[in-house]
Amino acid sequence: MQQRLTILFAHYGENWIRGSERVLLDLMGGLDRKQFRPVLWCNSEVMAAEARALGVQVHVSPMAYFLDYASPRFSPRMVLRLMSEARRMIRREKVDCVHANSAAPCQWLAPVARSMGVPMLAHLHANYLPRSRYVCLLHLVPLLVGVSRSTLQGLQQDGLPDGRTEVIPNGIDWIRMSGGDHRGFRQELGIAAEDFVILAVGSLIPRKGHDRLIAALQRLPAERNAHLVLVGEGSDRGRLEALIAELGLTQRVHLLGARSALADMYMEADCFALASHDEAYGLVFAEAGYCGLPTIGMRCGGVPEVVQDGVTGLLVEPGEEAAIVATLASVMDRLAADPQLRVKLGDAGRARIMRDFDSERMIEAFATIYRRLTASPALATGWRGIEFGPYLRMLQKRRPSLGF
């Protein structure tokens, strides 16, 4: 009989539930409790409440990390407190493996896990700049798991061996997606059944490129009766509302705010689009594909690893903003004019997502890693075997190249 393993999940972030938080909750909730005991350490009360609802033991305390872009002034006292708290928690909970959900917790967890002989991995949901990779001590973490190949490229360029990295795509939890209020947005917004609806799901922040979609929509022929429905909230709402009014699109662009029943949202749309300036993975592309929607995205970051151009969706090349908007309008119009193409791309997308991006597949992949790391802890703990090459090369470079 296999030993039940205690996994300490460390999450540092804002007080909300978005992409990386949702993936972690799906992972903790899906682990076989006969084999694994998840314990969450986080700084977010919202995240803590969601985890407790899944039956996960939770510890909440203030967190911070330092020396990075826009991080607070360095506090040795805070770092020592976090390291001391990590040691106590690992001893008290008898932790078998540490799982850092992003780079920030590695700054204090990597040295502690190494010194205590506890295996550790970092789950990376973003593309980190050189300075972030070094100050978060990612190169000290025994195993780095990226949600896409693009999230690991910087670390590989630093000289980290291939054996220290692995890719596990985010999985789709259909049951979780289907929960919620089940309100139909077409009826709510007065959109006719025959009108063409483009759905975008993502925080209302500049990086998501919602302004590109709004500008592209204005270029579509009037006979398309096209609408853009944006689901999400964020600091960019005011600017987007002003742009919508300026372009005379108040009857065709709809800001719905945050919604929980995303499956119902996808089911009512004709296509999905997101024009992000950068996207490490794009969980919403996989969700839309699972629901049989053709997808439109930018050829950047991890998006091409989810959206297959011409097979499950259509990708737009980065470049000048005017060219991007013109191309977005062109592919939107192409899908609006060709229902058969929409069905073809949507069917192919659903088949691929069900095959490669299922939540059970993701959960089992992490379970396998936990077993592997704990079965041979000597390979992933202690100070021997650490690759100091990236740090030595970093010191040889000029400081400006790392952003210090």
Image (cartoon, rainbow, N blue to C red):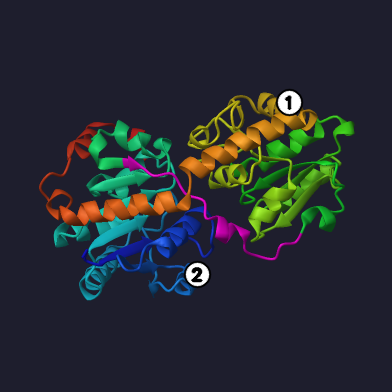
Q: Report which residue position mark 1 lands on.
A: 330
The 10 Å Cα crowd at callout 1, few under 14, some 14 to 19, many 20 or more, is some
Q: How many marks overall?
A: 2
Q: Main secondary structure of the magenta part?
A: loop
Q: Residues within 10 Å of mark 2 (few under 14, many from 20)?
A: some
| Coordinates of residue 15 in the picture (x, y in percent) | 51, 65
Kind of residue indicated by mark 2: Glu
Q: Is residue 368 left or right of residue 268?
A: left
Which residue in the protein does label 2 denote? 50
- Residue at image position (49%, 73%) is 53
Residue 349 position within the rendered picture, expressed as x and y whole percent measured from the top left:
58, 37
Judged left or right of residue 206, residue 355 is: left
Q: Residue furthest left?
A: 384
Between residues 122 and 43, which one lies in front from this camera angle? Answer: 122
Residue extending furthest toward the right: 223
**294 displayed left or right of 245:** left
Between marks 2 and 1, how big is the CA–CA gap?
41 Å
Specify the segment rendered in magenta. Answer: 166-183
